[in-house]
Structure formats: C-alpha cells, structure tokens
Image (cartoon, rainbow, N blue to C red):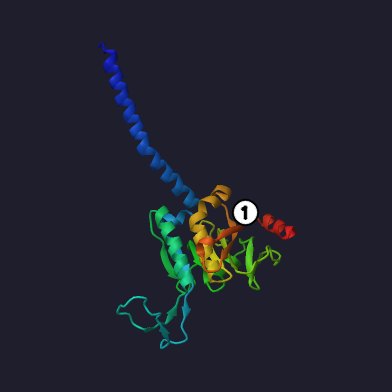
Amino acid sequence: MWISEGLAAVLWNVVGGAIVAGLSLLFPYVKRQLRHLAFRRIFGSDVENIFYIVYPAVHSPSSETVFEKPPSLVPRRTSAATRLTDVHSTAVTRAVNHLSFEIGHNSKKLPRIMSDVDADSSMDISYISIGGLTNHKTVDLLDDKNNEFIDFASNTIVSKASGFEIFKMEQGFDYGMIMKINPSNNQKRTWLCCAGLGEWGTSGAAWWFSQNWKEIHKKVKKKPFACITQTKIGIDDSTQKVRLFQTSEEVKKAILSE
C-alpha cells in the first residue's frame, strides 16, 4: 500500500516522539537502579533485607535519676524533668537521623534500629554501628581479624597493625572513622561503623558518609575500606575526609609519610 510522503513524515514523527518519551521515562529508572546497585555494594546486600543501625545504650545511675528538661523558648505545656533508665547522646540521635534517611532513600526496606546491648550476642548480622569503644558492635568490628586498617588508642586513631598514629590532629576539631569489613565469622555479612574520638567526630562521620558514600564507591566498589574524617566541633556538615584507605599497605605508607 502506497503512503504519501506527508503521511510517512507524520508517522515518523509519532514514532520518534514515542521513542523519546520512552527514553525519558527509562533514563530516571536506570539511573535510580544504578544508584541502588552502588549503595548495595557499599552497605552490602543485606541492606535490602535485614540491616541494623546499632546505637550505644548507656544506663543512667539508677532508675530514679531525674534529668532536667531545658526550658522551652515559647510558652507550652512541657514537663520540667523526667526519669530515665537509659541515656542517649544527641550525637547518636544526629547520626541515626543522617544514616536512616539515606538508607531509607536508597533501599527497598528501612533499617532496624537496635541498641548494642540488645545486639550484644548477635554476630551473624549486617549493621552499621554508631560510636566508638562505647558501642559493643564497633568493638566487634575493630577487634575482628579482618580489620587490617585502623583502631582507637590513647584518644587518637592508629594503625591496627603497628599502633602508630597515622595523622596529626588539630585543635578545634574532632575526628572520626568510617570503616567497612566483611567479618571473619561470615563474610557474606557486612559490618560498618561511624565512630569518633568524641561525639562530634561520631555524628560528623555519619553525616559525611550519608552525603558522600558515592565518592567512596567510585574508588572501592564493594571492597572493605577505612576512612578518617575531620569535623569542626559543633558542626556536623563541616566534616571533611582526611584519608581513605583501601589496603593495609596504604595505612603503612601513611605512617611513613608523617
């Protein structure tokens, strides 16, 4: 059947428009899927199944301990004090907020939030722990034989292998670490931590990781890594990366360069 040139042009325009519209719809989907794939490489495949954010629980001196509530800036009916059996730092709240939002944005399932006391004997899980030596699960990560990177010692961050300090600290700043390993007891699991020398080091590391995990992914893909961060005390979003290690050899070279 013969088709006029005008009709053919119209048909080609319709087909071309349909293709462009299809690609316009497909591109955001592909981009989103690639982002989710990169996120799974960093956080592990369990982030799509059961993944925990583990915070450090601290008991108050007694169940009758009274904590004063800061007064409201505007008139409202607020209790002036409360009795608590568990105490949580504002750094933990900030860190959980930074990380839970990013995990929820990039995963099909929301993370489960659990204290290190509740997770104390759970070794066959994937998690990101908040805080340093005050968190049982951070200690599990640091002490695992598959951690060949860094550790805490004498209020600084040191080489795991030698115990030597690997950077110089500056006044007015707090420092933190972001680390990932696959634990020796089950390498299908993923253990991560955001831990600081102080509270701003912890929450700053969590903020930086939530904002910059894609930068880490470009360099390490799904491999273990350790990152040291620097945070201006009192300002999470001032955090900057100091060093990123992909191997124990890189940690050793960092010591030699100081």
Measuring 47% from the left and 70% from the top, which residue is drawn there?
92
Measuring 72% from the left and 60% from the top, which residue is drawn there?
255
Q: Is residue 165 left or right of residue 115?
A: right
The residue lying furthest to the right in this view is 256
- Looking at the rendering, which quadrant does residue 147 occupy? bottom right
Whether residue 17 is situated above or below residue 59 in the rendered picture: above
Whether residue 32 is situated above or below residue 86 in the rendered picture: above
Q: Nearer the viewer, residue 148 or 29?
A: 29
Residue linked to disc 1 = 246
Q: Position of residue 171 (x, y in %)?
A: 63, 69
Measuring 45% from the left and 65% from the top, which residue is drawn there?
96
Q: Nearer the viewer, residue 4 or 152?
A: 4
Amino acid type, callout 1: Gln
Which type of secondary structure does the marked residue at label 1 adopt?
loop
Q: Is residue 224 visible?
A: yes
Q: Quadrant of the C terminus?
A: bottom right
Q: Quadrant of the N terminus?
A: top left
Q: Count the marks.
A: 1
Q: Is residue 76 left or right of residue 181?
A: left
Q: Position of residue 196 (x, y in %)?
A: 56, 68
Q: Is residue 233 left or right of residue 6?
A: right
Q: Position of residue 103 (x, y in %)?
A: 43, 57
